[in-house]
Amino acid sequence: MNSKEVSKILDNPKFKLLVKKRKTIRFVMVFITLFIVLGFFLTWAFAPDFVSNRYPANSAVTVGTWMAISLVTLIVLISALYAVFFGNKLDKLNDELLKELGK
Amino acid sequence: MNIYIKQAFIGLFFCLLVTPTLAADALTGSVSKQPLNIPAIVIFGAFVIFTLWITWWASQRSKSRSDFYTAGAGITPFQNGVAISGDLLSAASLLGFASGFYFLGVDCLLLVAGTVAAWPLILVLVTERMRNLGRYTFIDVIAFRFSKEKIKPVAAIASLMVLVFYLIGQIVGAGKLIQLLFGLDYTFAVITVSSLMVCYVVFGGMLAATWVQFIKAVLLISGGTIMAVLVLTKFDFNVLKIFEEAVNTHPKGDEILSVRTWMPDAGAVISTGLTLIVGFLGLPHILMRLFTVKDARAARQSALYAVSIIGFFQFVIIIIGFGAISLIMMNPEYHDASGKLLGGKNMVVLHVAHFVGGNILYGFIAAVAFATILAVVSGLTISAAATISHDLYAGALAKGKVNEKTEMMISKMAIIGMGILGIVTGIAFENQNVVFVTTLALSIAASANAPVLLLSMFWRRLTTRGTIAGMVVGLVSSVTLIILGPLVWKNVLGYAEPVFPYAYPTIVTLPLTLFVIWYVSITDKSKTAKLEQAAFDEMFVVSETGIGAASASKH
């Protein structure tokens, strides 16, 4: 690609829309992931007593165990949300753009 | 610029010089040879014959360079996703995680969290952009808008160090495991693993390596699931009961439920988490698999399959590891006269397999553990071969002027070289404690590879100079702090107290690398820096749209 082609695509309104949407989705995804992951590790690191609490109270399962189980489940779910739902939406937009550019 | 390259070489030589002299007793590794295990040998033999047949089939289809490195980008997303999960579900996560729960308790759930946590980030930040920008290796992506001759050698060294250290850890582990599980000689085991690995990859390239990984992953997941279900039947399918009986049985009692049984303090927790999460973003053999599918969409789907399987398997391991405590901890059949677990610490999963499924399940899981190592080292080898021939030779030494035949020749020589290296280091390190090599691999991936890969795709201001400085600092600081840390300074060199407190140094090395990359890049006022920053526009367009991305070849 030469620089003329590049700047033509950069100015294309569909490209701009695609980039903007992808940026928003990326930001939201990274934010949610960091919230879950940092939440997990910081709690584990700085609140050991809380993590060692039992839930249910008279059982042998700790809050930390539930945290780990929830983390794995949530991570798989939000990965699916991006890969299937948002991904397909963005792909559609991308395909339209490529069609318009004749690629 | 040369000074950076020189520093990287000095770092590499330092490692090569230091490692063989690290003489100490194997602290975790001593195993005793077990009697011949016939069911395991038969099942493993069947696996080898079948995978060699696949290799022969793949060799008919691996003619071009692109076939060889990335299976012509013709792997389906499902198959690739399973293969990626196979790369991450190594023998360490099957045997090591379960033993961690068994001996240390809930604190080892950190490993579970660290294993899955990176995936949404890989999906959102890496998969699509990388698939659009690269062709064979992640170094293609880093070198996209920079000077290939300067970037590629440094990046190739960092990448090779990750792969080689990983390989050494796997091969030494393989030798011990096979001695333990099959009752075969250590040296014989090391030579078998290395030769089979060379055979798969030299003849079948990425296509064979992917199939081997796929088959092994299917065996591992089905074997693990059967075991977990059988374990659950012993607890009336009540997960709460598993933990209750574990606490009642374990000599440490309640203590296995509290944190800080494994991690000494908050800093260690954070540093371990950082290494695992960021490290996964920089593992060359995993990143390379994203180029084996046809486009960015398929790469994204592969990652989703991978994280789903990996997530599922974490539950399997948790059930087996904690279930093991009440099932076998007090069972004299699995302990010697002095009360030690037969065969050593890594045997927990195998004893559980025997307890719930008799000799056949034991043999099956033992064969799968062997197959796991074989599949992982094959993936490492194809990745190292591509790095040597495509990045180091074609990209840097020959300045891009090579024909396909010479490049393929070099990559086959590199594969044979990896096989020899595997045998030599495997035999040399038999009685060494090699836990640190895997840590080293992951730390370099987290501190040198991952930040550079991410920033090259997302930060316009990054320059060649900043990239090289960052990689060298990440590499050298990781190596230094691991040598000064508990795994080498205390466990291998035998000093009482480590100079650096944590096993994983990423809490220091990652911020340091990021700072160096930032500072060197923004102070780079050279003309080439301006051009490189301007070239970000093109990189941006390609990464977002996939225009001009390498596409699938027809088969």
Image (cartoon, coloured by chain):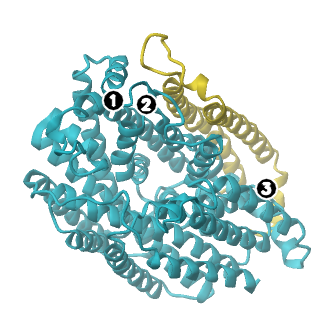
The part of the image, by quadrant, that contains residue A22 is: top right
Mark 3: which amino acid?
Ile
> According to the image, label 1 marks what residue?
B250
Q: Secondary structure at mark 3?
A: helix
Q: Position of residue B112 (x, y in %)?
A: 48, 39
Q: Is residue B552 visible?
A: no
Dot 3 and dot 1 within a common chain: no
User: What residue did someone put label 2 on?
Assistant: B256
On screen, residue A74 versus residue B27, left or right, reads right
**At 72% from the left edge and 80% from the top edge, which residue is drawn?**
B4
Q: Chain of mark 1?
A: B
Q: Which chain is yellow?
A: A
Position of residue B289 measured from the top left corner of the image (x, y, whole percent): 47, 58
Residue B257 vertical position relative to residue B87 in the rendered view, above or below: above
Pick whichever, B228 or A86, lies toward us.
B228
Q: Chain of mark 3?
A: A
Residue at left offset 41%, top offset 56%: B75
Toward the viewer: B140 or A55? Answer: A55
User: How far apart in space, not on screen, are marks 3 and 1 (Cα)?
Assistant: 65 Å
Residue at the disc numbered 3: A9
Please tell me the colour of chain B.
cyan
For disc 2, the chain is B
Above or below, comparing residue B551 to residue B464 in the picture: above
Name the residue type under label 2: Ile
Q: Quadrant of residue B546?
A: bottom right
Amino acid type, label 1:
His
Spatial separation of the CA atoms under disc 3 and disc 2: 59 Å
- Residue B259 placed where, x, y %? 53, 32
Distance of mark 2 from mark 1, alpha carbons?
A: 8 Å
Between discs 2 and 1, the one toward the N terminus: 1
